[in-house]
């Protein structure tokens, strides 16, 4: 299978940081775009630059949307800390952003390079703006592989954080009409950074492993302390990368998925048609259903080791 060419659109974020490592190792990473989400845009952009330098990458980093399309900005300090990447001593980046026009970068790249995968692992603001400004992208890109949504919520009982932050943007993406893969919570909660797995990261030598070990520990501690029955941090965002580079590790269910925009209790919910009827709504999304978590984590270990000196 050819290596997928991707743009990673992210809001680092502990699991976004791991997604950057997976993307750098297993894809042709054309660029990183930042978005407001886990933390304000200045922080998520800074964190993307930190990861770029830690990995020694030469990919461009473009700063994106300051806030959601319609909804007020919301952040997730309760999981990621105020900086978006609390828990480790991060080396200050020497790289600087290549532009503050992530949307322009996405459009230009997809127009000049056919078959790009867009991989959003934060709120879908940048992707929705790109699709609105350049509807021709639908027929230029290979597809969109996103982390968000699922069959249950985390920010509310119905809504997952990335979709809940910018439901109007998510609605544009789920209706864009091209190939779409959803790594929702029902999938990503199967892939957890548990203590034994974090200890494997800590056993690696080098700066990246040391930083990621600390970040994963912080992330796991937040998850374990906030849940009744969770033995690790859900490693959400790398799933959207690995399902492109290693699809054999996943099963999918093609389904119709709609984004709830108006529900009193359900705004931001991804409504997955799971009815076992002959007459269901036409699928618009490959919903990731299962992951082989042990080999998937092995891939993360190999990727971290690869960049850790
Ligand atoms: C998603 O929200 C963020 O906190 C994570 O980075 C992930 O993208 C999980 O709901
Ligand atoms: Ca994220």
Image (cartoon, rainbow, N blue to C red):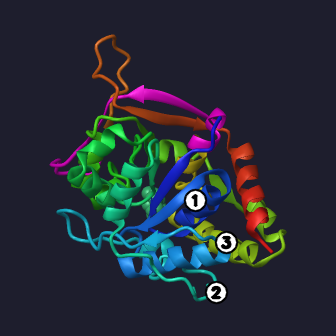
Where residue 261 appears, x then y in whole percent? 19, 48
Does the magenta portion include 135?
A: no
The answer to whether residue 155 is seen in the rendering is no
Residue situated in front as seen by the camera: 36 or 164: 36
Across and down, in percent, residue 89 comes to: 64, 86
How crowded is the residue under tag 1: few (<14 C-alpha within 10 Å), some, or many (20+)?
many
Q: CA distance from mark 3 to mark 2?
A: 15 Å
Query: Quarter of the image containing the C terminus?
Result: bottom right
Relative to 216, 15 lies left or right: left
Give the residue number, with chain letter if any, for mark 3: 55
N-terminal of the two: label 3 or label 1?
1
| Of the two numbered discs 3 and 1 in the rendering, the one whose residue sits closer to the viewer | 3
The answer to which of marks 3 and 2 sits earlier in the sequence is: 3
Most foreground residue, 53 or 302: 53
Image coordinates for residue 59, horizontal then vertical, percent: 55, 67
Q: Secondary structure at mark 2?
A: loop
Give the structural element (helix, strand or loop) at label 3: helix
Q: Which mark is residue 89?
A: 2
Front residue of 49/254: it is 49
Assess whether mark 2 and mark 1 are in contact (beta carbons under 8 angstroms).
Answer: no
Confirm whether the magenta stretch covers residue 256: yes
The residue that mark 1 highlights is 19
Q: Which residues are magenta?
A: 244-270
- Residue 300 tag number: none
- In the visual, does 222 lie left or right of 99? right
Residue 175 percent coordinates (x, y)? 26, 39
Label located before the other in sequence (1 or 2): 1
**Residues marked 3 and 2 touching at CB (< 8 Å):** no
């Amino acid at each position: 299978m050819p290596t997928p060419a991707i743009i990673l659109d992210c809001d680092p974020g502990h699991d976004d940081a791991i997604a950057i490592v997976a993307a750098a190792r297993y894809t042709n990473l054309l660029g990183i775009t930042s978005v407001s989400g886990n933390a304000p845009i200045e922080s998520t952009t800074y964190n993307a630059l930190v990861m770029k330098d830690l990995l020694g990458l030469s990919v461009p980093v473009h700063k994106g949307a300051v806030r959601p399309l319609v909804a007020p900005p919301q952040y997730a300090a309760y999981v990621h800390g105020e900086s978006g990447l609390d828990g480790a001593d991060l080396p200050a980046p020497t790289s600087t952003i290549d532009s503050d026009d992530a949307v322009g970068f996405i459009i230009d790249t997809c127009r000049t390079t056919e078959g790009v995968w867009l991989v959003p692992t934060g709120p879908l603001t940048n992707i929705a703006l790109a699709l609105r400004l350049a509807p021709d992208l639908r027929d230029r890109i290979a597809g969109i592989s996103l982390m968000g949504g699922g069959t249950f919520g985390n920010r509310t009982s119905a809504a997952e954080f990335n979709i809940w932050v910018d439901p109007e943007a998510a609605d544009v993406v789920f209706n864009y009409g091209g190939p779409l893969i959803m790594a929702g919570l029902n999938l990503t909660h199967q892939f957890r950074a548990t203590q034994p797995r974090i200890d494997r990261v800590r056993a690696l030598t080098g700066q990246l492993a040391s930083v990621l070990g600390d970040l994963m520990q912080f992330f796991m501690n937040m998850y374990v302390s906030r849940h009744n029955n969770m033995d690790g941090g859900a490693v959400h965002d790398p799933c959207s990368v690995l399902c492109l580079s290693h699809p054999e590790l996943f099963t999918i269910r093609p389904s119709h998925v709609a984004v709830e925009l108006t529900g009193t209790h359900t705004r931001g919910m991804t409504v997955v048609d799971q009815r076992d009827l002959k007459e269901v709504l036409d699928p618009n999304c490959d919903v990731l259903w299962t992951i082989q978590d042990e080999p998937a984590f092995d891939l993360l270990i190999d990727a971290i080791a690869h960049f850790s000196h």
